[in-house]
Image: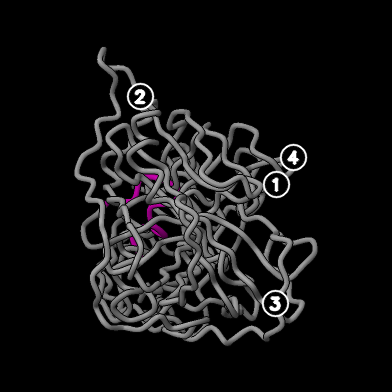
């Protein structure tokens, strides 16, 4: 079995201060909130195609690599980051968002992960022209593994990158990754989008959905860097590798653009992302299983457990009362509700229920169409704030 790991890198640097608590808006050094002038290189749409229409990674690199940065995080109290083996620092990548000095990266590049997440005491951002400046952590999103930093843009030549849209991601399309694998700054690797809609681990109990799989080389230190389309749009943030050795072996994963844009927007506005929470664990229902269970639907989510005190519990959703084996799975829940749709959106894939709820905000009311004892009914549920740690189930 390969292991799935964040692509961050242990840095051989020491600091002598304790790590601060993970509160929105806190961070290492504050370069000031005033808006100032900086030299900005504006990148509209990059022509990453050669004269004959071929994908041209060199053109992308020449135009966009100045917007990719190396991030060094110092924790300062001996606590080790997710992938650190020694020392008191971690290193990853990131990219410039705008002329004001906002930078995007992975949350695991600047935090120790969970449980008891702590932020780096100091964060430094290095540019391709040799500049290296302090930054503060604006906010982190452990669910999508995204963080936003802020640095003082004065005296810097910034090259902002543009975050695209998930709808632009197509299997087989060429992509380029720029970052600092193994600390080798401003490195380029190329490949294709191998698959979409993957589920990968986050820094919490919840998975991150709709992740992009690529065969572009992603190695420790690439975390937080951009996965770029042939037009120079950021399709995702490189985050994880599936590896037996600890290095890239052709299976890398990136956080999708839509999730990245949402995280950036909310972190800049409020320092956190208000994900909605339903409070069920479920298994997918597919046609063959539905027929085996005698259910009059062909798809949906079989509710296995309902968490105590959750919105699902308050709405009286029912978990399974028994289990049975089907196609090698001994734990197929029986006797519980089947969620057929959310706000009219039919559930057809394994991850649909989790992905739809993840796209909602806390405080939103959703309407579930469920099947209970052979009867269809509509249930309204008001979502609450998603917890980082697992609640109790019943």
In this figure, which residue is indicated by the disc labeled 2?
Answer: 56
Q: Are marks 2 and 1 in contact (CB under 8 Å)?
A: no
In this image, 180 relative to 76: left or right? left
Residue 359 in sight here:
yes
In which image quadrant can residue 204 be found?
bottom right
Q: Nearer the viewer's eye, disc 2 or disc 1?
A: 2
| Residue at figure coordinates x 39%, y 28% from the top left | 58
Given residues 332 and 81, the one toward you in this image is 81
Q: Decide which of tag 3 and tag 4 comes sooner along the chain.
A: 3
In this image, 379 relative to 335: left or right? left
Q: Nearer the viewer's eye, disc 3 or disc 4?
A: 3
Q: Decide which of tag 2 and tag 1 comes sooner along the chain.
A: 1
Asked if the magenta segment contains residue 55, the reply would be: no
Residue 244 shows which numbered tag? 4
Q: Secondary structure at mark 2?
A: loop
Q: Are marks 1 and 4 in contact (CB under 8 Å)?
A: yes
Q: Decide which of tag 2 and tag 3 comes sooner along the chain.
A: 3
Q: Decide which of tag 2 and tag 4 comes sooner along the chain.
A: 2
At which x and y percent is residue 105?
A: 46, 60
In this figure, which residue is indicated by the disc labeled 3?
Answer: 15
| Residue at figure coordinates x 63%, y 42% from the top left | 242
Q: Residue furthest right?
A: 86
> Quarter holding the N terminus?
top right
- Part of the protein shown in magenta: 346-357
Q: Are marks 2 and 3 in contact (CB under 8 Å)?
A: no
As measured in the structure, the alpha-carbon distance from the residue carrying label 2 to the one carrying label 4 is 31 Å
Q: Secondary structure at mark 1?
A: strand
| Residue at figure coordinates x 59%, y 86% from the top left | 20
Q: Are marks 3 and 1 in contact (CB under 8 Å)?
A: no
Q: Secondary structure at mark 4?
A: loop
In this figure, which residue is indicated by the disc labeled 1?
Answer: 3
Q: Nearer the viewer's eye, disc 2 or disc 4?
A: 2
């Amino acid at each position: 079995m390969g292991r799935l790991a964040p692509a961050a890198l242990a840095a051989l640097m020491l600091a002598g201060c304790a790590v601060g608590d993970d509160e929105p808006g806190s961070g290492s050094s504050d370069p000031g909130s005033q808006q100032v002038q900086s030299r900005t290189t504006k990148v509209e749409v990059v022509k990453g195609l050669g004269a004959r229409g071929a994908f041209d990674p060199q053109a992308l690199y020449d135009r966009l690599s100045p917007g990719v940065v190396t991030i060094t995080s110092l924790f300062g109290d001996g606590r080790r980051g997710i992938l650190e083996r020694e020392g008191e620092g971690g290193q990853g990548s990131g990219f410039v968002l705008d002329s004001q000095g906002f930078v995007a990266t992975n949350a695991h590049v600047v935090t120790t992960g969970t449980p008891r997440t702590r932020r780096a005491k100091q964060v430094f951002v290095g540019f391709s022209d040799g500049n290296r400046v302090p930054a503060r952590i604006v906010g982190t999103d452990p669910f999508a593994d995204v963080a936003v930093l802020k640095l003082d843009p004065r005296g810097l030549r910034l090259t902002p990158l543009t975050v695209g849209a998930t709808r632009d991601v197509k299997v087989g399309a060429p992509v380029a990754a720029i970052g600092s694998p193994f600390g080798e700054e401003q490195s380029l690797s190329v490949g294709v989008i191998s698959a979409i809609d993957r589920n990968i681990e986050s820094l919490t109990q919840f998975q991150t959905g709709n992740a992009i799989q690529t065969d572009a080389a992603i190695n420790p230190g690439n975390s937080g860097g951009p996965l770029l389309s042939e037009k120079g749009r950021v399709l995702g943030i490189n985050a994880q590798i599936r590896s037996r050795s600890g290095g890239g072996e052709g299976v890398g994963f990136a956080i999708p653009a839509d999730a990245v844009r949402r995280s950036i927007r909310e972190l800049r506005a409020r320092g956190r992302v208000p994900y909605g929470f339903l409070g069920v664990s479920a298994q997918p229902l597919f046609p063959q299983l539905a027929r085996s269970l005698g259910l009059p639907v062909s798809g949906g989510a079989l509710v296995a457990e309902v968490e105590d005190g959750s919105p699902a519990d308050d709405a009286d959703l029912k978990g399974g009362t028994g289990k049975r084996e089907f196609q090698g799975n001994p734990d197929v829940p029986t006797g519980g509700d089947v969620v057929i749709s959310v706000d009219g959106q039919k559930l057809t894939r394994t991850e649909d229920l989790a992905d739809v709820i993840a796209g909602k905000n806390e405080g939103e009311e959703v309407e579930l169409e469920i099947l209970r004892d052979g009867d269809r009914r509509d249930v309204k549920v008001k979502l609450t704030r998603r917890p980082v740690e697992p609640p109790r189930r019943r």
